[in-house]
Amino acid sequence: MWTRTSIFVWAGTLLLSPSSAQPGVRVNVRIFLEGCFLANGQLMQDSLRVQHLLPLDEPYAELGYVHVGDGGLEHTSGTVMEGTGPDAIVDWVILELREAAANGFRVSTRSALLQRDGDVVDMDGSSGVSFDVEAGTYFFSVKHRNHLGVMTSTVLMFGPDGTPLDFTLGTTQVWGTNARKEIGGKHVLWCGDANGQVKYTGSGNDRDPVLTLIGSTTPNAEVPGYHRHDVNMDGVVRFTGMTNDRDRILLTVGGTSPNAVRTGQIP
């Protein structure tokens, strides 16, 4: 659960009133999530959608994320969720416009839909995502419920015409060190996150909640559903066996260094 002490909530957040939002901002973002990325076809699997597990209402407020501006309460339709092919919906993500001067204060946030080909779209399942703020220069970040987020390394100009931003390309500069992982020539968000960092051992690790969810005395059990601990996003939480979620956490911190910690690079 995200809390008010999480990196997802920033003290002194700047709110921007709708009355000042002229002419507005639209973004055309592209990202890949490691947990469900298929390198061969350079698409993500949409197992959650196929199993009818994706919610029609944005899930992040319930997880403790506090939206800013006009974000939150986003709702899509069953028709959008029924789409197939490269444009099929994989999951919900969070998009954040961040103040250029303060480098961190969130100006406006939106929940949006992620497609198999990496495109992030608005509630109609096809349009770029709009923000009710003034056009101008901003940092931009993307977050997901069980992947480490990513942010631009510098401020960019955003306006109403649909600013393109492709985080799958190595040429797109991002904040921090090793903020993304390269697979098959594409850059993806690291999987395994629950609270801004990925840990396999120690206090607040990401491994133990997987075991707790399935039952600490039954490590071979499986729990289907839309769960944050489903790191590979196949619709089932597993601690052991093929395609388990525990191993993905270990690989993120380093398979030979289970005590290591991989920290998100959004400041």
Image (cartoon, grey):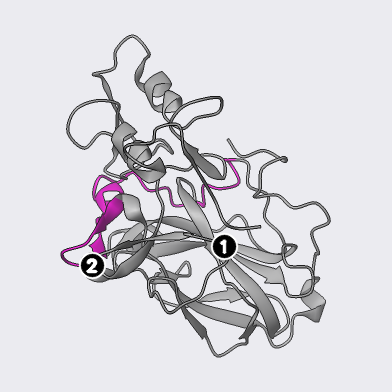
Task: Point out the image quarter for the N terminus.
Answer: top right
Mark pair 2, 1: CA separation: 25 Å
How many numbered tags mark residues here?
2
Quick check: 101 above or below 205?
A: below
Residue lying at the far front in this picture: please name it.
256
Q: Nearer the viewer, residue 11 or 48?
A: 11
Q: Secondary structure at mark 2?
A: loop
Q: Residue at x 72, y 41 (%)?
A: 4
Q: Residues within 10 Å of mark 2 (few under 14, many from 20)?
A: some
**Secondary structure mainly formed by the magenta segment:** loop
In the rendered view, tell whether residue 166 sits above or below residue 197: below
Can the viewer see residue 194?
A: yes
User: Taking 208 as reference, is 101 above or below it?
Assistant: below
In the picture as drawn, the residue positioned furthest to the right comes out as 12
Q: Amino acid at mark 1?
A: Gly
Q: From the viewer's side, name the closer residue of 224 and 245.
A: 245
9 relative to 266 in the view: left or right: right
Percent of width and height locating residue 69: 72, 64
What residue is shown with label 2? Answer: 42
Which residue is located at x 42 percent, y 79 percent? 171
Q: Which residues are magenta?
A: 36-63
Would residue 143 be seen by someone viewing this image from the given angle?
Answer: no
Which of pointers 2 and 1 lies earlier in the amino acid sequence? 2
- For residue 244, which quarter of the picture? top left
Image coords of residue 59 (percent x, y): 51, 47
For residue 235, above or below residue 184 = above
